[in-house]
Image (spheres, rainbow, N blue to C red):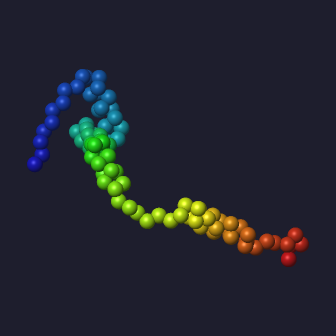
Amino acid sequence: MKQRLQVLIDTAELREIQRIAKARKMTVAEWVRTTLRAARHSEPTATPERKLAAVRAASRHEFLAGDIDQMLAEIERPARSSTTTAPTSSPSGG
């Protein structure tokens, strides 16, 4: 069910909204609905307390992780091997 929303604004602000809506080829009502939706979607969906509770709950779990030195070596290995095995051309061109 749709509901009507009435907002009181001063004349100068209404003119500015009308100008913006016209430039976007929208009605004022359509521009207001779109702008309100965008503002609503930009609001956080969870409170900081809820987010912290989720992080704390996740931190109580144990996850497998490799040795950091081994992981770094594995990351670097392909880069090093590709530069050392790259074909080289001879200065004579053949």
Residue 75 visible in the current orientation = no
Q: Position of residue 62 (x, y in %)?
A: 38, 61
10 shown above or below 25 = above
What residue lies at 24% left-to-right and 41% top-to-bottom?
33
What residue lies at 79% left-to-right and 71% top-to-bottom?
88
Q: Position of residue 52 (x, y in %)?
A: 32, 46
44 shown above or below 85 = above
Q: Between 94 and 13, which is closer to the camera in this rendering?
A: 94
Q: Between 69 and 5, which is closer to the camera in this rendering?
A: 69
Q: Is residue 39 left or right of residue 93?
A: left
- Report which quarter residue 23 is drawn in: top left
What residue lies at 29% left-to-right and 48% top-to-bottom?
53
User: Which image quarter holds the C terminus?
Assistant: bottom right
- Report which quarter residue 3 is drawn in: top left
What residue lies at 26% left-to-right and 40% top-to-bottom?
36
86 shown above or below 40 = below
Q: Is residue 74 left or right of residue 88?
A: left
25 shown above or below 54 = above
